Amino acid sequence: MLRDQRYRVRLVQVLLLAAVGALVLLVVQTTAANLKARGIPIGFDFLSLPSRFVISESLLRYRPQDSYAWAVLVGLANSVFISVLVVLLSTVLGLVVGIGRLSSNPLVSGSCRVWVEVARNTPPIVLLFFLYSLWWRVLPPVDAALTLAPGAYLSMRGLMLPALSLAIPSPAALVLAAAALAALASLTRITKPVRRALLLGAAAVTIAALLAADISAAVDWPRFERGNYRGGFELTPELTTVVIGLTLYTTGFVAEIVRAGVLSVAKGQWEAARALGLRRGQILRLIVIPQMLRVIMPPLTSQYINVVKNSTLAIAVGYPDFLAIMGTVINKSSHALEGVAIILAGYLAVNLTLSLLLNWYNRRIALVER
């Protein structure tokens, strides 16, 4: 058996994995023994204890009486919220700027090039500091807030908007059924008529659930009381600074990826489309963009993962993201090793999930060779 090259290769791989596993086990045992000798607690039991600290703003409902585990989820939700906003905004702006760089209008192409060069050559943390300081120096105080629209007020304390609250006590079973039908419709091995029928069924079930429910809606308008605005929905300076700063920074990279994707489409495609009488917008929408997606998806995946990692810079302007909240958890619980492990696991889970979804989409649009 040792004369078989394939067997030898597999044996070497097994031995390497065993050596790495033994080294990891040795490190874990040594670390646990040293921590125990110094009286430092170890374990994840602290996650069930009350956190007893305040989170200034959160996407999920949070109280200081909630557990450390819930505080961790609140921080992770804040980071995911920032990442999703930045990905969506930078994708749309990057598409516009990337195509604008190829414009024959020198003003449009020059402006887009300035955006790209400034964004790509500026450290993102410096950009965040600049925008945050600009926010406090340019905007008026809250008692002299700018009225952008009825119910929309902008001041140095943030942007106040009307909030819409919906009470939809729809049955969970119907919602789950609609989600299940939509998931089945996304399968690749079913025919188009079956997929269309499943999608229509999912839409019908969802509409039936909404019609059967007692839906109530109300608009909460911001109002100025006791030196500040009450009610409505508030976009704080910290959240707005992070979203705008990371969007400006990421757009520069996405624009270059889009530009490379457009240039990857052969000129003959453009000429054939013009010969058919298609306008430039139709050529981009119907011919160029569908073809360039196959080229730009791998680098876009890496760029979106960088967005999640760059969201840790929110701590620089005081926004309570996952990293900032985990720092507070570590300081209050004295479980530094476990806290760092949770940080690594959280960002790894988000990035792996994002990579899995984008790789699945990349396989869907890839050319199938026969």
Image (cartoon, rainbow, N blue to C red):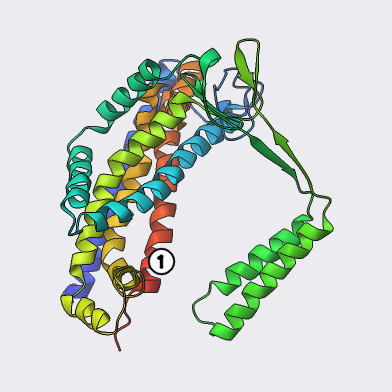
Give residue 252's position: percent from left, percent from top. 25, 46
Front residue of 96/185: it is 96
Q: Is residue 363 above or below residue 111?
A: below
Residue at far bottom of view: 370
Look at mark 1 in the image and give the residue it sits on. 361
Give above or below for 53 relative to 44. above
Is disc 1 placed on a helix, strand or loop?
helix
Q: Amino acid at mark 1?
A: Tyr
Quadrant (top left, top right, bottom left, bottom right) of the N terminus: bottom left
Residue 237: percent from left, percent from top: 45, 24
Which residue is nearer to you in this view: 352 or 138?
138
Q: How many marks?
A: 1
Relative side of 138 to 168, left or right: left
Q: Is residue 268 visible?
A: yes
Residue drawn at x 19%, y 38% is 118
Q: Where is residue 262, by image quadrant? A: bottom left
Query: Quarter holding the C terminus?
Result: bottom left
Examine the rendering and report whether any part of residue 28 can be seen: no
State the image quarter where residue 358 is shown. Answer: bottom left
Please give the name of the residue rendered at 57% of the width and 27% of the height, measured from the top-left corner: 68
x and y percentages locating residue 190 in the rendered image: 54, 82
